[in-house]
Image (cartoon, helix red, strand yellow):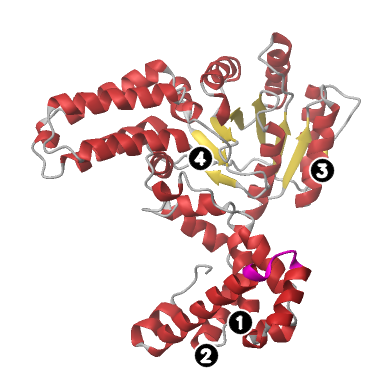
């Protein structure tokens, strides 16, 4: 995400750090480049100007010019201003004691509104809540079908009435939720291709009819400045509580993320980072600023690992590593754990020092699939004792997995080297400590 603007910032910081000394002149040059990078990312021009004015005001002070590491101090100033622009602190979803809590979801058609409603339901279900999805997009029949299909995947009920108005559906769904022990009702309202009076009136009627505890405005992060204009109109009519950015896994330039909070003065609550229903993250301004500036996001990566990695499997793996019994079956299990974390490039980009390195590198996302296919094409004995795999067996495995003998050779070589490394680690005192603390997938 934000690859274009991250690359611009990396180039600016590198040039400034390479200066023999920092002066007001080259700080002004750097600030001008920062403003250009923001405008090219389709950031609102008023927001870009205010951002760079603040950076320049703080940077031209004696703290930067006289600092031992002025380039680093300038980067810190930009980072702090970026965090402030994005919202200073994380805004958690606050739920009241009312049953049900009513959450209304609004936005344009195609923004990912319906998918977000399902993702939010899945997120709340993982927190021990009992959500109900409410299909109020009666103008687009496919929207109701889509919501039902998504809800089926996560085993969450949907309230549907194809013969009632949106307001009637919303009101009836609240009674249905109370009678069926559903503590949260998530109302998916109608979207249009653009803001129009009919759409806004219907949304206002739903709002008046059920008085939602929270209203979320969903915006496609790839739409840039248009998203800001739409947000302003929705906020004027609905006075929503928070923003949701979708499609951050796509070619998002960053304009919406960097502009919208400043313009409407409402917090960004969630970000959608993939198509799967579990790929919804709470928005953290400091972590997002770190990603945008190419500094990685190791905290989010650790949280992802903690959520996805099976602790009992990790304990068994630790024991097998200690006994030097690591097999290709264990290796395949670890690859499956890695794939749960999402895109391999996104995972690598969260590691500090790696984010910039992988920006322009084509990461082969299918590599893990090929390795899984190769190992699955082996017999149980071959997985446990790969040294028995001779030329004839390699040809058979290659044919069964749709790969080449060279792919088999490469995998076996890498696995042998990995086994050797674990064997060396398990012998030393510090190596045993490392194995004991190993919880990340290999």
Considering depth in this image, is 274 or 420 the residue closer to the camera?
420
Q: Secondary structure at mark 4?
A: loop
Magenta stretch containing residue 437, yes or no? no
Considering depth in this image, is 135 or 14 the residue closer to the camera?
14
Q: Quadrant of residue 239?
A: top right
Q: Secondary structure at mark 2?
A: loop
Q: Residue at x 20, y 24 (%)?
A: 28
Q: Residue at x 89, y 28 (%)?
A: 162
Q: Secondary structure at mark 3?
A: helix
* Residue range of the region highlighted in magenta in the rendering: 401-406
Contact between marks 4 and 1 (CB within 8 A): the answer is: no
Q: Is residue 261 left or right of residue 399?
A: left
Mark toward the viewer: 1 or 2:
1
Instruction: Identify the residue under disc 4.
Output: 1
Instruction: Identify the residue under disc 1.
Output: 327
* Cα distance between the residues tagged 4 and 2: 41 Å
Q: Is residue 335 left or right of residue 151?
A: left
- 79 lies above or below 420: above
């Amino acid at each position: 995400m934000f690859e274009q603007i991250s690359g611009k910032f990396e180039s600016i910081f590198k040039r400034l750090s390479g200066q023999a000394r920092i002066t007001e002149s080259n700080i002004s040059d750097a600030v001008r480049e920062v403003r250009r990078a923001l405008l090219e990312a389709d950031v609102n021009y008023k927001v870009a100007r205010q951002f760079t004015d603040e950076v320049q005001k703080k940077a031209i002070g004696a703290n930067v010019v006289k600092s031992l590491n002025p380039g680093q101090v300038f980067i810190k100033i930009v980072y702090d201003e970026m965090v402030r622009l994005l919202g200073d602190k994380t805004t958690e979803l606050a739920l009241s004691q009312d049953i049900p809590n009513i959450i209304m979801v609004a936005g344009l058609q195609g923004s990912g509104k319906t998918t977000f409603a399902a993702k939010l339901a899945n997120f709340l279900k993982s927190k021990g809540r009992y959500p109900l999805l409410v299909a109020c997009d009666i103008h687009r029949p496919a929207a109701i079908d889509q919501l039902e299909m998504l809800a089926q995947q996560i085993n969450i009920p949907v309230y549907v009435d194809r013969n009632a108005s949106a307001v009637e559906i919303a009101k009836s769904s609240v009674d249905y939720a109370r009678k069926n022990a559903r503590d949260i009702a998530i109302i998916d309202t109608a979207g249009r291709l653009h803001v129009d009076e009919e759409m806004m009136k219907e949304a206002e009627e739903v709002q008046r009819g059920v008085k939602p505890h929270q209203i979320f405005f969903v915006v496609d992060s790839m739409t840039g400045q248009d998203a800001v204009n739409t947000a302003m109109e929705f906020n004027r009519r609905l006075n929503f509580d928070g923003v949701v950015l979708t499609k951050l896994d796509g070619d998002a330039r960053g304009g919406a993320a960097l502009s919208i909070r400043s313009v409407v003065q409402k917090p960004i609550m969630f970000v959608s980072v993939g198509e799967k229903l579990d790929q919804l993250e709470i928005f953290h301004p400091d972590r997002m600023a770190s990603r945008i500036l190419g500094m990685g996001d190791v905290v989010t990566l650790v949280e992802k690992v903690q959520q996805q990695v099976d602790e009992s499997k990790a304990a068994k793996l630790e024991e097998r590593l200690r006994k030097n019994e690591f097999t290709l079956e264990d290796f395949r299990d670890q690859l499956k754990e890695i794939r749960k974390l999402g895109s391999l490039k996104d995972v690598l980009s969260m590691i500090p020092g790696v984010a910039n390195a992988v920006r322009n590198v084509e990461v082969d996302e299918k590599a893990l699939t090929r390795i899984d296919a190769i190992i699955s094409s082996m017999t149980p004995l071959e997985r446990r004792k790969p040294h028995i795999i001779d030329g004839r067996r390699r040809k058979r495995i290659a044919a069964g997995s749709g790969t080449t003998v060279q792919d088999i050779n490469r995998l076996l070589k890498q696995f042998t080297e990995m086994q050797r490394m674990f064997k060396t680690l398990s012998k030393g005192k510090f190596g045993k400590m490392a194995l004991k603390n190993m919880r990340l997938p290999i």
